[in-house]
Each structure stands twice: as C-alpha cells, then as structure tokens.
Amino acid sequence: EIVLTQSPATLSLSPGEGAALSCRASQSVGSSLAWYQQKPGQAPRLLIHDASSRATGIPARFSGSGSGTDFTLTISSLEPEDFAAYFCQQRRNWPLTFGGGTKVEIK
Amino acid sequence: EVHLVESGGGLIQPGGSLRLSCAASGFTFSNYAMTWVRQAPGPGKGLEWVSGISGSGGGTFYADSVKGRFTTSRDTSNNTLFLQMKSLRADDTAVYYCVRGGWSSPLDYWGQGTLVTVSS
C-alpha cells in the first residue's frame, strides 16, 4: 500500500498570504496524484488531478506540482473561502490511498 | 450537470447489514468507474477508500478492512451504484460518499454522503 504523508498537519495563515502544502508518497505514483478541498459538513471537491491539472472551475490561485514521490499544492493568495482541509490522493496503485490531510486555518 | 445522490444510511446494530444506493445522473454512467469513500465522523478525520467498480461492473476492488463483508455492484440500466454491507462493526461508522472515477480517472464528482452509524 502506498502511504501518503501530508505536512504540515495545520497551517495558520492570514488572508492574502500564500500557502504551500506538501504530500510525500512512500513510493513513486508518477503523476497520478490529486488534491481535494473539504469544508466542514461538505463533501470533498477535486482541485487538482494528475499532479498539476486544475479541475473544472477551480481558480488559478490553486496550482499543483511534483512527480514521483514529492508533490506540492500551492495557493498563491488565500481567499477567505480557502480556509479548509486539503487531502492528497493517489490512483497509481491499489488500494487507492489518501493522505491524512492539512488543515489551513485563519491565523 | 453531474449529480450523485446517496441513500440508505442509518443506525444499525453491530453484525447487521445495510445497502447503500447512489443515483447517478448527468453523465453516461457506464463510461465511468465508480468509487465508495468513507470518512469517520468528527473533526480531523481523514478519507478512506472503501471500494471501486469498473464501468462495466466486471471489475471490483475492496479495501482490506471491508473485503469479504462489503460488495459493490452497479445497475447500468438505472444508473445506480450499490454498496451492500454485512457484518457491520462499530469502526464502519462513517459518512459514505459515492464518487465518480477511480483508478483510470480522478475522483471528480462526489455525492453529499450518507451517514452509517453502527451501534447497539
């Protein structure tokens, strides 16, 4: 099973600041990595797929990078609605696995 | 517009059975793999992949934690995904999400989830 480790667990930032969230895989997943945003009481929403492709309707301030084992989700300038939990997920190997999540909270 | 609507959740005693349904609309159902993902209740809980099924229904995959107890199936004529759960345990308590996609495509659309609570 591929283990995805996200860091940090919590990121405390102010609106307008940039954020960099890390996801590290225990073995290569190529570019088969996605990022999801989840707000309390809501289902997750796909932000980035295949490491760097923005999903439909996702603002340009969200970008993904990386390949192999190290990936980053970057939010260029945090909007109030961006404070949420973020999860990475790989679909390279069975079982599909998720990272433990990073919570981006208001400082 | 893609819509996924889960139903069938509720309170069930340990050892019991439950069947979840997911009604899909807005896309050609048989063209997509589908996935069940669950999330235990409470703040800071993560996402756990449960099961996946191919577009044709010919291939199914399960997490070790549910293998032998859960069965995923699909009815392409009615655009419905199912998760039959038996021998339920307290640690199966979670919100269960129906999701479009799987190993061949990203998990791009999620239902609103249905809560399953296993408790006596």
Image (tube, rainbow, N blue to C red):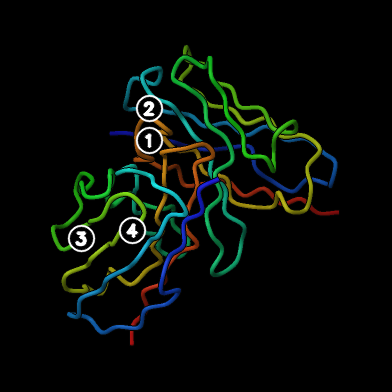
- In terms of sequence position, does the residue under pointer 4 or pointer 3 come before the other? 3
Element assignment for label 2: strand
Q: Please report, as a chain letter, where disc 3 is located.
A: A
Callouts 4 and 1 on one subunit: no
- Amino acid type of disc 3? Phe
- In terms of sequence position, does the residue under pointer 2 or pointer 1 come before the other? 1
Callouts 2 and 3 on one subunit: no
Residue behind mark 2:
B25
Residue behind mark 1:
B3
Q: Please report, as a chain letter, where disc 2 is located.
A: B
Residue A14, located in which quarter of the rendered image? bottom left
What's the distance in space between the residues labelled 3 and 1, CA to CA?
24 Å
Q: Please report, as a chain letter, where disc 1 is located.
A: B
Label 1 neighbourhood size at 10 Å, few (<14), some (14-19), many (20+)? Answer: some
- Who is closer to the viewer here, A70 or B101? A70
- Amino acid type of disc 1? His
What's the distance in space between the residues labelled 2 and 1, CA to CA?
5 Å
